Amino acid sequence: MKPLRVEYDPAVDALAIDFPGFGAGTSARMVRLDRDRMLDYDADGRLVSIELLNVSHGVKLDDLPEPEVVRRALALLAVGRPAA
């Protein structure tokens, strides 16, 4: 799965990754993994987006879906890093 849109907002230190085939507003369920990592799913259970907060402090990848996509987005935007 490749992201459709990757956006970093330095004002709030947040990274948003949206996945193809789904428009804005199609999220039916949000899953908060912890205070810095949220996942949005559509009504059929497909991943719509990943939102990460405080990315400059590191991002825990181990239980995220699509961890390699997140790793590449962090590297491409030169923000954050995978957490140790």
Image: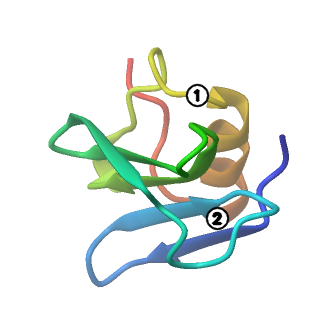
29 sits to left or right of 4: left
Q: Decide: is 42 above or below 37.
A: below
Residue type, label 2: Leu
Q: Which residue is mark 2?
A: 77
Q: Secondary structure at mark 2?
A: helix
Q: Is residue 60 above or below residue 18?
A: above
Name the residue: 48% across, 40% down. 81
- Quadrant location of residue 39? top left
> In the image, residue 37 lies at what x, y percent?
32, 43
Q: Residue furthest left?
A: 35
**From what the image shows, is residue 23 above or below residue 1?**
below
Type of the residue with mark 1: Pro
Q: Residues within 10 Å of mark 1 (few under 14, many from 20)?
A: few
Mark 1 secondary-structure assignment: loop
Q: How many marks?
A: 2
Compare residues 70 and 41 and report the one nearer the observer.
Answer: 41
Q: Is residue 15 above or below residue 37?
A: below
- Tags 1 and 2 touching, CB below 8 Å: no
- Residue 65 circle label: 1
Q: Quadrant of the C terminus?
A: top left
